[in-house]
Amino acid sequence: MPDLLDTDTSPLLVVEGMSKAFGRNSVLRDVSFSLFAGEVLALVGENGAGKSTLMNILSGGLGHDHGRMSLGGADYAPTTPTEATAAGVAIVHQETTILPDLTVAENIFFGSEPRNALGLIRQRELHVRTARLLADLDFAIAPHRLGRDLSAAERQMVEIAGAVSRSPRLLILDEPTASLSAAAAASVLHLVARLKATGMAIVFISHRLGEVIGSADRVVVLKDGEMTLEALRGAFTRDDLVQAMVGRTLSNIFPERPADVSTAPRRFRLQAAGNSRLPPIDLCVHRGEVLGIAGLEGQGQKPLADALCGLRPFTSGQIEIDGKPLRLRTPAAAIAAGIASIPDDRRTEGLALTLPIRLNLSLFALRRGARFGLLSVAREADFAEAARRRYDIKAVSLEQPVGQLSGGNQQKVVFARWLADEPRLLVLYEPTKGVDVETKGEIYRLIGELTQRGVAVLLISGDLLELIGLSDRILTLYEGRISGEIARDAFSEEAIMHLASGPAPSEAVDA
Amino acid sequence: MALLIIDRLRPVSATVRAAALLALLVAVLLVATGGGSLQLILDNARQAAPLGIIALGQALILMMGRLDLSVGAAAGLANVVLASAFAGNPANLAPALALTLGLGLAVGLANGLLVVALRIPAFLATLATAMVIAGGILVTTGGSPRGSIPASFRVITEGWIGGVMPWSVVIWLIVGVALMVFVHFTLAGRRMLIAGANARAARHSGIAAGPLVVASFVVSALMATLGGILLSAITGMASIGIADSYAVDSIAAAVIGGAVFSGGVFLPAGAACGALIIFLLQSLLYVLSLPPAARFIVQGAIIVFALALANYRKEG
Amino acid sequence: MLEGSIRRNLLMTLPALVLVTAMAAITAGASPSFLGETNLANLSSRLLPVALATLGQAIVLFAGCIDLSVGSVISLATALMATLSVPLGWAVVPLTLIAGALCGAVTAAGIDRFRINPLVMSLASAAMVKGVTLLILPSPGGEVDYGFYALLFESDRLVAPPLAITLLVYALATILLGWSRMGRIVYGYGSDPRAAFARGASPRRVVYGVYIVSGMLAAAAGMVLSIRILSGDPLIGDAYTLDTVSAAILGGVALTGGRGNVIGALFAAAALVLINNTFNLLELDTNLQSIAKGLIFILALVFFMRGKAGEA
């Protein structure tokens, strides 16, 4: 039911002077904007810009320090997600909240199941209603499937369906298209347009600038917790968005690339290499080259990265490094062969967070300093101190647990550890995820330096700006296979997205 | 009041905290018994040595992010086996020790393999081995174990070096220092520490956690066996179920000493303080002539207190 | 009715059904007296306490936690019955149940307020409860009012109170866990606590709920036990803790939470009782039982952990 009060003139959601800090770390400073019913607001910003914090405050997952919000004219300050739901706000998180052991239908209606007179859940009705809802939204997912069996894209769609089923006044979508193919993303955007026509207000976060320009009525850009741009449709360009997000033009943050690296000797090569999670793949990287690997979420990036570092090794095909055949059975073998790999999730795969920085830094260097299995404490301390200076790691003491550092400094520790010996091949998997812009620049510069010395870099990333700025060549992955290759002079977001959404018939693969 | 104390203790390192608590307890005990001497304290340490050594093994297991609930049974096994193998005759020293330690090794290997190769959660695997060991002891002894420990061997707990230092305390110290050197100053120990703090990160860095976990269970079982041997020397005979409470007591001791269940922390001095605290508390209860039941309540409460304190510290 | 996750959870009970059938067949083959009505009635009165305690354990496991204080609470209940049933009469029943609920609440408080690992917290409360029990009843003894026995165990027909209570309690639990919002939230929380919290489930209510229920069921099990032996025993419950975990896992309840059905736990509890019965009928050393149970437990873990690893 539309509100009979003057909905046309007063905004549905008003956010004023919103601020939030975690300890001394201020993550949101004085953010204000408003949103009318039937409008789509795009919230844009780099990782760590404060978007998720803002979303969590809006949806009751997090309190705020200063500022106020109103929803439909009334004060709005939810302290729990349940309160936000009751007020008519629904959120779809990027990290989905699908319960793995419940079915799609049970997930959608979790906590609001239809019940009979005895208070017992009507299981059949639950599934029938879900089938209807999903059909209505054009989502082809069976309501009986278990949460754990859904793909990333399907999880996202179930989350959206669940949020929509509650007919909220305000729908918040946190990067709803990040894991979707072009076709699925288009259908989500189409749905957004349909919901908007019913008078729902929608906030969506996106990294894809094309999407933002195409479907947002209003855009808010955050950088380092501050609002750097608020504009209405038609009043902003792609360059405005980039400028507001990054704070400078991109050419300054990425290192200068040499004109042509394809004539350099071949450093690393895979021929029909695959395993149970990864169909056979062919690729090669030259000395000093940055090979970008692009793709939608979950198209084989993780299996590829895991195979390259020996965690889940290749079981078929040939691997060559500097012309010599190689077996990559274990992480230790990969390290011995000169392959360094920076994992995507440094908190679970990169660092021992509770241990001091010194111990995390010296992991590989230790081996050289050890005599008869005994550690050389003095050498370890020297090494750690040198690494701290070399990588400008900002820490009170090297004995501080590494978990206390900021994301950017943690990532520097990871790099410093892996680069204790100069690798031949550096595999980077989302190297700047959750890292501040300044550290990002430092990491990019470091990559530039390494390639100048002949290190080959394989850059797996979902950040298109980063791929375009750093790579000499980009391969796209789709369903675990290489679906296309783009040369430096043909780089564009559109070209990458096009190839990443499915196989292209005429693209040849360099092998 | 309690919160105020916790707040004061917050920034202090876990070992220092445990040591402070220990000092307080010693003071209380001395007052309660009407004054005492260094000798008295050392005598308490002498008797606390079995628990102390077992707690060291438990601390190592906790460093690996696991739990060993079979240490009580393993210590009991050592007691029964040692006594019957010795049969009161000092000449049986070598075979008795070899058999006892060999069985301890087997228990540790069994635990490690159940956990690593069969991927059974450690606390359940060790609970099951504890049950099998206890059953095995009852079946083979028929409930009345035989044998005794010769007096010459009992020197390891009853004897004092030059009348000033109990042998068992020396053994305890040696084992503790050895473990500390191993963990903090050897490559293998460092790998264990990192694998315990974050097994996935360790694996990514070329450290296979599996063999290290097995090794930690072997060490823990050997510590339990050694604890059982010392306990036998104290009692001089075999008894059923004499070491049962060590499973929970050793966890409590390690936790008081700053061990955390998420792994990656090894504080042998803390664990030693923890073991002394547990032992002294039990003595205190005895001195205050409280019923034996009280020790269980204290045992549980102290675990809750130590963990609540540790978690409060983490969040604050 | 049996749509969605309920159907899948019921399928997980099949191995336990096979197990209990096989055990029954073996026992019947080994001893002709097995199928006699007296032996069956005897079995069902032995099953009742195990079944009650196992149900509580299973519910805690559904929520992804574990309760190692079950045995101590059982002992406490026998001690309360042995000391209070004669002076208090029927009032001892609610009193014992409240005591069990309190034990559960203490465990839950440690987990919820102090963020202590559920396993260790329940181990700590097990020690504390044991201490309290030993204060109440330092050694086996005491007396339980015969009126309780007359009511519960006098009949030696198969369809007697023990079997009826078991079936009734399990039917109620099955319905509440499968078809109520409360039950759905327990499964959802065990399946993924973070996600369930984000979707409005209250971790506090779930944790307190499951541990209080488990405490009450363990207390009920202890009452039944003390009524059967007409006395109390401060250590009688110890062996039950592992039995309940064992039965729940054999019954297809996942240690990781969110999966399984109490019916499977009932089948597995029955299988364990049959194993005991077989040992008795074959006149084997009772100490062999604890070895056998330990080995069965390991086998159950291996079997069911494998299945899970394959799925993931």
Image: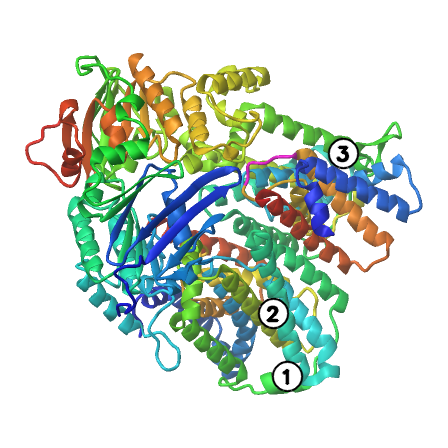
Q: Is residue B175 visible?
A: yes
Residue position for label 1? C149
Magenta stretch: helix, strand or loop mostly:
loop
Chain of the residue under label 2: C
Q: Which quadrant: the N terminus of chain C?
A: bottom left
Query: Would you identify the image quadrant in which residue C182 lies?
Result: bottom left
Q: Which residues are magenta?
A: B263-267
Q: Position of residue A471 (x, y in %)?
A: 23, 24
- Spatial CA span between label 1 and label 2: 24 Å
For disc 3, the marked residue is B91
Is any atom of residue A454 visible in this view?
Answer: no
Element type at marker 3?
helix
Question: In the visual, does B306 lie left or right of B282?
Answer: left
Look at label 2 and name its amino acid: Ala
Q: Secondary structure at mark 2?
A: helix
Circle 1 packing at 10 Å, graded few (<14), some (14-19), many (20+), is some
Q: Provide residue B304's location: percent of width, then percent of height.
A: 65, 52
Q: Chain of mark 3?
A: B
Identity, as a three-letter code, of the amino acid under mark 1? Tyr
Q: Which x, y percent locates residue C206? A: 49, 63
C139 drawn magenta = no
